[in-house]
Amino acid sequence: MNLRNICCFFIVALFFYACYDDKGNYEYRDINEITVEGIDASYARDVDDSLRIYPVLKGTMYDDTSRFTYRWEVAGRTLVETYNLEIQVDMVPGERSCRFVVKDKETEVEKYHRFSLNVSSSTAGDLIMVLSKYQGRAELSYLRLDKPSNWAINYYQDRYDELLGVEPKQLRIVYAEANRCQPFVNSYGRVMVLADNRVSLLDKSSLMLDTINPYLTGEAYTGLASYPPPDIEGYESQYLIEEGISIWRSDVYGSYFQQATYFAEVSGGTLYTAYNLAPSVWTPGYTYKGKSPHKGSLSAFAFWDAMDPTPDTHQIQMGYDCGDIILFDKTYGRFVYGSAYGGVKEIKKADFKYFEGYNLLWGSATNMADDGCVAVLNNGDNCRLVLFKSGYEEENAKNTTKKWVADIAAGDVIKSTTKFYCMKYTNYMFFVTDGNLYLYNLLDIQSGMAPNSRNLVTKLTDMGYDGDAVITDICVSRTEKTLLLGVSRYGNDMEASGEEAKGDLLYFDLNSSTLSVQYNEEKSYKGIAGIPVDVEIKYQTHWRDGMFKGELKDNI
């Protein structure tokens, strides 16, 4: 018998033995077959929208919901283990495969019901944004303005697993849309977050960190320079100057808007600029490490001294004459000024007073003639208010310069922690100190009248707050119809410890003609952030004063 026959013999023998050993004991049980209804095949939601699904179980034997366990999964990750799904869609945009898993407690048989969830951006529109300090880190919160929505509260680290920093300082919105001018802007503009002397670059539509250029660096300002290597040693962002929207007008056919804007920052005590940020026509340029002519260090604040609206012609104009960049050499206590195109100029002693020992705390263009400006200097909590304007040098009347007008001690109601807003078309400024909101006439500087308690508009205790609450920031809408205040209820807890968010946003209706403010409790919110550091309104599109052809474009 050959080997093949031997193998076949053993296989047949094993088969018969297995059949003989089978006792033939087959017992069958009916299984409760489950069907799930009430779940659509697909859902579409914006980020931070609510998603509610209420399934209905039907079983061939029983459908008592207490006899099952439940699990909702998104992209393989368990969301919740409840019968009904009621969540806020805290996810980045994209389409996801989901399933509802029902498990019979007795038989452990699982039923899967699959569906899809398409998440779209909720941030590609107007938002109120709050940069705050929460649990010792920089955090973001926002509220959509295009429809009734819930706040996304301290969401950034949990959603993106990214840390913005631990010492938040500033939010800056850049409206130019020019893909060729990266990293300053992209085709949707920018939201910049300054924390720990580093600027994180977020997409203005998605609020996601740029995957190619996540941070602003000194190299961005060096352009095509290659040899000798540009000197950007010491670059560290200290203050982002408001975007100078120089050109924003319709083309001659009215088919699109031509754009060209300026961006500048104080970094390492020097001036860095980017000009002609534009999608086409104008060539962008960059300057770096513009130093004070006195060789001292520049204060970590700067501002444009003119924001005059460009006259409207046959082309729709929404830009500004931005003027010069006002800077302050804190080493020598001297004002200086620069240009978006680079360079920092001296102001002669005959034209401007010195302020040794002071720092530039804040400043703004005003509605006064000759590009009149106001600045606040501080030496600790010892502050001074300074008025100045553009003019001609005393020593050489052919040269333009900045001219001192008046300065006074700022009194007891302005401190190093005070925040300010200067009205665009009247000579008044609002400011907040501790728990109080004040309104001050800038012409009083020339009269020698410092702000005091008579300038008080309202205080937090009038709105039910205790004495530990403080106003940490002020923001006014571009229409000047709304005034927002960031409020902290953390008291002496400067790290905003604990789970509870104790940062609030108070909403006031503002009349820019009478300068009256009315607290709007219905539109105010509590517990929406950590300690508010910077409150801003992110508009998706630039409209000068929130208007277009006489039509109000803003929804705040």
Image: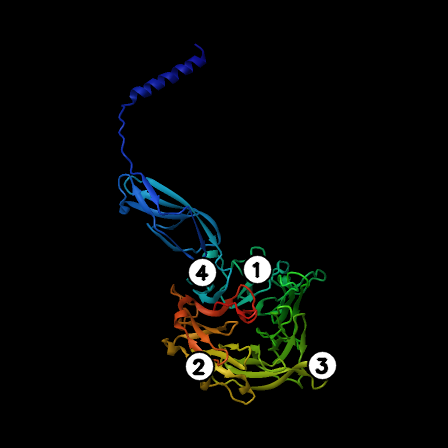
- Among the two numbered marks 4 and 3 on one chain, the one whose residue lies closer to the N terminus: 4
**Can you identify the residue that label 1 sits on?**
188
Q: CA distance from mark 2 to mark 1?
A: 39 Å
Q: Indicate the quadrant where residue 87 lies.
A: bottom left
Residue on which disc 2 sits? 457
Amino acid residing under circle 2: Val
Between 450 and 365, which is closer to the camera in this rendering? 365
Question: Does label 2 or label 3 sit earlier along the sequence?
Answer: 3
Residue 142 percent across, percent down from the top left: 46, 64
Asked if the residues shown at circle 2 and circle 3 are in contact, with their CB atoms under 8 angstroms apart, the answer is no
Task: Pinpoint residue 149: horizontal percent, then vertical percent.
Answer: 42, 62
Res 131 visible: yes
Q: Nearer the viewer, mark 2 or mark 4?
A: 2
**SS label for mark 2:** strand
- Look at the image and tell me in which quarter the N terminus lies: top left
Residue 11 figure quarter: top left
Q: Quadrant of residue 177?
A: bottom right
Q: Earlier in the sequence, mark 2 or mark 4?
A: 4
C-alpha gap between disc 3 and disc 1: 40 Å
- Measure the C-alpha gap from mark 4 to mark 1: 22 Å
Circles 3 and 1: CB distance less than 8 Å? Answer: no
| Residue 155 numbered mark, or none | 4
**Helix, strand or loop at disc 4?**
loop
On residue 69, the disc is none
Check if mark 2's residue and mark 4's residue have beta carbons within 8 Å. Answer: no
Secondary structure under tag 3 reads loop
Residue denoted by label 3: 399
Residue at the spot 40% in from the left edge and 44% down from the top edge: 114
